[in-house]
Image: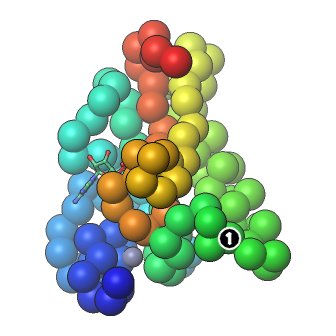
Amino acid sequence: MNVDDCVFCNIANHSISGDIVTENDELIVLKDILPKAPVHLLVLPKDHIPSVNDIKPGHEALMGRMILLAQQMAKQHGVADSGYKLIFNVGKEGGQMVKHMHLHLLGGKQLAE
Ligand code: AMP
Ligand code: ZN
């Protein structure tokens, strides 16, 4: 897929608007457009990495910073103590619709399995 056609690349490079919570040089946090919980954020790298299947040696620090940013977002959105889920969907049977790797942060209610 051409990255020009990638919705998260286009939000990350500000070609199209998105509900951006925070961003830095490397990562961006969006409010999910169809939230499945009171808090539903997406943490993603600005670089186009299609999925967890494309993670390679060298991405360890990036992956760690994604989780640290998710933890910070959980605190800021008041769900760190009540609890939350961090989910990577991978591929078709994993339910991945957007082929630009993203970490879901879900919280604010009792979450099902
Ligand atoms: P996944 O099924 O893991 O690929 O999740 C993709 C998520 O991206 C879904 O929860 C969508 O609601 C969400 N989504 C799709 N387009 C946008 C968008 N433009 N801005 C924010 N979230 C989006
Ligand atoms: Zn992309």
Instruction: Name which residue lies at 30% across and 76% down.
Output: 6
Asked whether, in this view, residue 69 is left or right of residue 38, the answer is: right
Q: Residues within 10 Å of mark 1 (few under 14, many from 20)?
A: some
Instruction: Name which residue lies at 37% across and 30% down.
Output: 39
Asked whether, in this view, residue 30 is left or right of residue 103, the answer is: left
Q: Position of residue 96 (x, y in %)?
A: 41, 53
Instruction: Name which residue lies at 60% across and 51% down.
Output: 69
Residue identifier under label 1: 55
* For residue 49, above or below residue 2: above
Q: Position of residue 107 (x, y in %)?
A: 45, 25
| Quadrant in which ligand 2 is drawn | bottom left
Q: Is residue 24 visible?
A: no
Camera-nearest residue between 3 and 15: 3
Q: Which residue type carries mark 1?
A: Ile
Q: How many marks?
A: 1
Camera-nearest residue between 1 and 79: 1
Q: Position of residue 89 (x, y in %)?
A: 49, 48
* For residue 81, above or below residue 6: above
Tag 1 secondary structure: loop
* For residue 93, above or below residue 28: above
Q: Looking at the image, which residue sits at the far left?
A: 16
Q: Looking at the image, which residue sits at the far top?
A: 110
Instruction: Name which residue lies at 55% across and 25% down.
Output: 84
* For residue 55, above or below residue 52: below
Camera-nearest residue between 50 and 13: 50
